[in-house]
Amino acid sequence: MRKLWLTFSQAATVSLAVLFVVSTLRPDLLTWSTRGNVVTVQQEQPPATAAQPIASFSSAARKAMPAVVNIYTSQEVKRQRQPLMDDPVFRYFFGEQFDPGVQRREGLGSGVIVSDKGYILTNQHVVESVDQIEVALGDSRKVPARVVGTDPETDLAVLKIELQQLPSIVFGRAEQLRVGDIVLAIGNPFGVGQTVTQGIVSGLGRNHLGITTFENFIQTDAAIHPGNSGGALVDANGNLVGINTAIYSQTGASMGIGYAIPVSIAKQVMEQIIQKGSVTRGWIGVGVQEVTKELAESFKLLKAGGVLISQVERGGPADKAGVKPGDILLAVNDNPVADSTGMLNLIASLQPGQLAKLKLAREQAETDVTVTVGRRPGPQRRKP
C-alpha cells in the first residue's frame, strides 16, 4: 500500500510540473485556458512572393502635388468715411481707429505650375483687382507673383514667379475622359493647406451654367471648396485634365457638384496669354437664341437644330455678308451648329481676317454665305 501511494504521488508531481511548464510556455495548447480573455484574430502574414498592391492613388497624388501651389492675395478697399468722425468730441474720445479709411481684404486660391520657367495657371477670379499676390510652393517657399494676363471669358489667368527649375505638371488629355473615370482635386481649401480629394467624372461638356462666356466644363463629385479655385484636377495617373473653377452649392461648401475647365481649353488660353498677353477670338456680330421645337415648327424645319439669328450688328461682319435676323445658322465651315454654346465656340475658334462659310436656312431654303471674321471685343468691365 505504501508503495502504491508513493507511485501515485510521484505521478501527480510530474503531471503538475508538466502542466505548469505547458501553461507558461504554450498556453495556446490548453483549449480550456481563459488566461487574459484574449480574443483570437486573423493576422495578415507576410507574402512569400510579391503580391498585388492595395488600390491607392498615392503615386498620382505624389506626382501632381509638387506642381500645385497656394495663392494668397490682398487688396486695398476704401471705406466710406463715418459721419461721426466729423464730430470733434467723438474723434477726441475714440480716436481715428473707428475710421480706418482703407482696409486690406485677404483672399486665397490655388494654382498649377505649367512650366519650369515659373508660369502658373489659375482662375481669373482668384487674382481679379488684387494689389499683391504671393505664391506658396510645396516646399514651403513663398515668393511674390505678377499677372501675365487674364481671360475673363474663360475665367483663366497666367501668373509668373521669378524662380527656375520648378516642378511642372504633366498635361493629360481631357478629350479622352469618360464619365466614371477616377479624378483627384488638389488645392488649398479654406486655407488649411494642400489637400487631395478623390471622386469621379460625373459629366462632360456642361454649359448654360452662367459661370463664364465660354463653357465646356468637366463635372466631378471630388470635393471642391473655397480656396480650391485654380487648383488641379488630375486623372488616376496624376496628369492634369482640368482647372477647378466653381461649385454648385447653397451653403458655400461642396455638395458633390464641382466644375473644372478642360485642360485643352486652358492650354490654348495659356499659350495665347504668354505669347500675346491676351486672348484673340473670332466674331461675326450676331445675337442668337436656341431653336426650340415650337420655333422649328413655325419655320417649317425638319428638326430642331442650329440657332436662330435674332440680332445682326449694323456694320459687323455678318451684316456685311448679308446675314439677316430670322435666319437659322445651321453650320460654320461645314461644322454643324447644335446650340448657341456650340456656335459661340465655333466662331471664337476662328482667326480674325479668316473667311468662314455659314450655312443658313432662310425662307425654307438653305443658302451659303461667306463672312470675313472679325475680332471679338473684350468683355465690358464691371462698374465699381
Image (tube, rainbow, N blue to C red):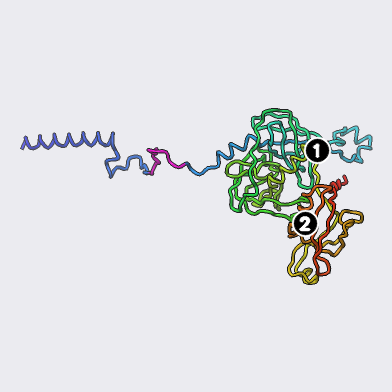
What is the magenta segment's predominant secondary structure?
loop
Q: Which of the image's four quarters has the C terminus?
A: top right
Q: Nearer the viewer, residue 96 or 244?
A: 244
Q: Is residue 179 above or below residue 308?
A: above
Query: Residue under circle 1?
Result: 277
Q: Is residue 41 left or right of residue 228?
A: left
Question: Residue 280: image x %, image y %?
Answer: 81, 44
Residue 106 lies, with reference to residue 344, above or below; the image says above
- Asked if one can make out residue 124 in the rendered structure from this viewpoint, the answer is yes
**Amino acid at dot 2:** Val
Question: Which image quadrant is residue 139 in?
Answer: top right
Identify residue type, mark 1. Gly
For residue 36, side relative to residue 353 (left or right): left
Name the foreground residue: 276 vs 86.
Answer: 276
User: Does the stretch in magenta take in 5?
Assistant: no
Using the rendered image of the protein, determine whether residue 379 is visible from the camera's viewpoint: no
Image coordinates for residue 247, horizontal then vertical, percent: 70, 50
> Which comes before the other along the chain, label 1 or label 2?
1
Seen at 66% across and 35% down, the residue is 168
**47 in the magenta segment:** yes
Q: Secondary structure at mark 1?
A: loop
Q: Position of residue 130 (x, y in %)?
A: 80, 37
Q: Is residue 265 left or right of residue 299?
A: left
Instruction: Kindly check if marks 1 and 2 are in contact, taking CB atoms under 8 A apart as contact.
Output: no
Badge 2 density bin: few <14, some 14–19, many ≥20, Cα 10 Å: some
State the extent of the magenta-drawn residues as a range. 41-52
CA gap, disc 1 to disc 2? Answer: 28 Å
Reading the image, the residue beneath label 2 is 332
Q: In the depicted view, which residue is nearer to us: 106 or 94? A: 106
State the SS at label 2. strand
